Amino acid sequence: MNQKKQLETLEVIQATSQKSLYSILNDRFESYTIVEETKKRRFPFVWKVYYTVKVLVPTKVQIQTTSSTEVFSEQLKQQIDSDREEKVILPVTSEKKQTKKRELLERLEQASVSPKEIKTLTVKKQQEVETNQLKAMLEIINDKLSEQKKEEIPYLKKIATILRDSGVEEENIKYYITRAESQFQSTNIMSDGEIYEWLVKETKPHIKIDNQLDITNSRIIALVGQTGVGKTTTIVKIGWQLANKNRSVGFITTDTFRSGAVPQLEGYMEKMGTELIVANGPEELTEAISYFTYVNQVDHILIDTIGRNYMDNHSIDTVKQYLESAKPDLTCLTFSAVYKSKDMLEIISQFKEEEFSGFILTKLDETKTAGGLLSIFMETKKPILFVTDGQDVTKNIYIPSHEILAKRMFRRDVPLSGII
């Protein structure tokens, strides 16, 4: 006769923490059985741990059954053999449980296992999984209560408020709160000035600056970044600073897609008395570099690369083709300070470390909440090469210090400094 019977399908779920993993499981499935749980680190962010779990989710199907125990045993045996072929790894259990499993498998081979015994084993396993889920949920609740309790302390509350107002991510706020709690255990009162000085002191070690950078040592300089981050204006600023050092400069643009990009550069070139070449592909870029090297013989070649959407893999591949042709001495990944830190980190992950030299942060004058940049400082190894804060191409570009950049994260009125 036909009847509904509950079988199971294998699902794979991934998250950045064990707590969020169980949260996803509870939201997505009414019931499930965990068969494997692993954690791995992913290049290039090797300090991040990614948790993966494989679960069996019940599904109802129509099957034909008989009252025969032999037929039931044969079907169960086939299901177990199929699971073995899929290499589903059950969690390591105690020796006593392993022995019990072996006994059940041996009895299954002899077609003597009963549905009642199989059901008992399944129920025990489900209870174990539910217990683990409950423990994870309690840990989440306890952590939230703990964070709320911490922020009830006056100086910790002040620190959290300043960080949130500065646009710092919640994950980094927890880091600062933990650091403050460990350093000021016997302190309940801190002035706003003391908190500000402490935040600057704690932030400086996370900021990477290339103190040895001498731009005159880089002959070919390329700026890479999405449309709208300010690459064109920034590369002209670099050229102007080099011209002030009595260095000759040649400009190449490959950004022929953005409306007005070439006329904008031509206007700057006329003021500077320098030459501009438009390259419509990697081959033309190579020819332009050869021209500036052997014919015009300039000291520096500055390349404004194609913009596009860097969330798109095809756009990234196109940029990398240009870089392979140019072989720059200095490749600057350029970001606007108004961008979300998560978007910046996503773009950074598209490049290998050897494919760029460091970062340029533009438009710092156009945001009131620069604290989001802390995620870039804390989660990458590359240095900040330059920062910009204005439209005047004859200035408004700096090699920042750790002190100035740390202060700017929390106070917009701190002026930038550090002449190239």
Image (cartoon, helix red, strand yellow):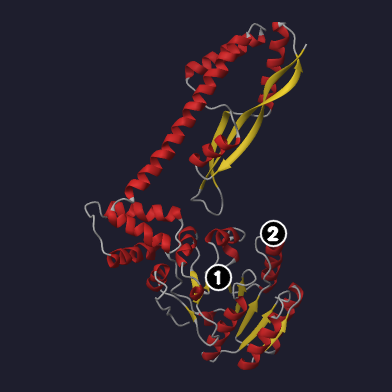
Number of other residues with Cα within 10 Å of mark 2, as a class: few under 14, some 14 to 19, many 20 or more: few
Q: CA distance from mark 1 to mark 2?
A: 20 Å
Number of other residues with Cα within 10 Å of mark 1, as a class: few under 14, some 14 to 19, many 20 or more: many
Q: Judging from the image, what secondary structure is the residue with disc 2 in?
A: helix
Q: Along the polypeptide, which appears first: circle 1 or circle 2? A: 2
Residue 150 in view (yes/no): yes
In-image side of 162 versus 279 (left or right): left
In-image side of 199 versus 169 (left or right): left
Q: Which amino acid does the dot numbered 1 rest on?
A: Ser
- Residue 220 % position (x, y): 61, 78
Relative height, residue 344 to residue 56 (above, below): below
Instruction: Point out which mark residue 313 bears.
Output: 2
Q: Which amino acid does the dot numbered 2 rest on?
A: Asn
Relative height, residue 58 to residue 281 (above, below): above
Which residue extends farthest left?
186
Mark 1, residue position: 336
Q: So how many labels did they put on this image? A: 2
Residue 273 in view (yes/no): no
Q: Judging from the image, what secondary structure is the residue with disc 1 in?
A: strand
Residue 267 falls in image quadrant? bottom right
- Residue 223 % position (x, y): 61, 74
In-image side of 382 versus 31 (left or right): left
Q: Residue at x 43, y 55 (%)?
A: 172
Instruction: Point out which mark residue 363 bears.
Output: none
Q: Nearer the viewer, residue 71 or 91?
A: 71
Q: Residue at x 59, y 58 (%)?
A: 346
- Residue 112 % position (x, y): 64, 6
Residue 277 falls in image quadrant? bottom right
